[in-house]
Image (cartoon, grey):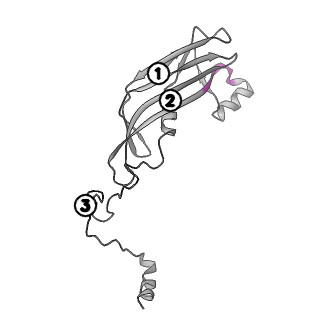
Amino acid sequence: MELNIAKISEKKGAHLFFNFSEKLSPMVIGGEKIEFNSPLFVEGTATNVGTEILVEGKINTEILVNCSRCLKPVCIKIDTEFKEEFVKESRLNEPAYHKLYEEGEIRTYKGNKLNLLNEILENVILNIPMKVLCSTGCRGICSICGCDLNVSQCDCRSESVDPRLAVLQKWFKE
């Protein structure tokens, strides 16, 4: 997802409208597989604001992740906006830009091409809920036999006591 900014790189205030649609392959993040259920659609504008190129846009896609309790696939719609500043890589030797770059406030580019893929994927990842559930009433799976508790009930005994506290269990029986 490269954006050619040759038309706006020399003229302050110039705008460039863009849109991309791309089918991405699955990613693994934190051991969790994330599949794209629909193509990633990105649209926005790039603006020359003097010393930087300001890129603003919208991201739309659907991803498939596993439910945190029962591990069934769940489709999540991602609809978010982003805003990033890009500075020519050659300007990083200026102290102000170098500090902003180290803090992650700005991105760099070479020549007349902006690669937006990392910023777009970062925004998609940030919009995935910490805990994905197939439904609010999901009962998950049995930690002993692995039975899906949404489908059937198992006969496993769920009263497990930490062996360090087993002595206290006798006290409650008296």
Q: Nearer the viewer, residue 61 or 160?
A: 61
Mark 2 vs mark 1, CA separation in Å: 9 Å
Question: Three-letter amino acid code at disc 1?
Answer: Met
Question: Three-letter amino acid code at disc 3?
Answer: Ser
Q: Earlier in the sequence, mark 3 or mark 2?
A: 2
> Marks 2 and 1: CB-CB under 8 Å?
yes
| Rendered view: 119 above or below 73 | above
Q: Residues within 10 Å of mark 3 (few under 14, many from 20)?
A: few
Q: Which residue is situated farthest in the bottom direction here?
A: 174
Q: Earlier in the sequence, mark 2 or mark 1?
A: 1
Q: Residues within 10 Å of mark 1 (few under 14, many from 20)?
A: some
Q: Residue at x 65, y 34 (%)?
A: 102
Residue to which mark 2 is pinned:
120
Checking the image for residue 152, the label placed there is: 3
SS state under label 3: loop
Q: Which residue is situated farthest in the right direction here?
A: 95
Which residues make up the magenta segment?
Answer: 84-92
Using residue 56 as the reference point, say whether residue 49 is left or right of it.
Answer: right
Q: Is residue 75 visible?
A: yes
Give the label, 1 or 3, closer to the camera.
3
Whether residue 104 appears in magenta in the rendering, the answer is no
Checking the image for residue 1, the label placed there is: 1
| Rendered view: 5 above or below 143 | above
SS state under label 2: helix
Q: Residue at x 26, y 57 (%)?
A: 151
Mark 1 vs mark 3, CA separation in Å: 46 Å
Answer with the quarter of the image where residue 23 lies: top left
Tell how many labels.
3
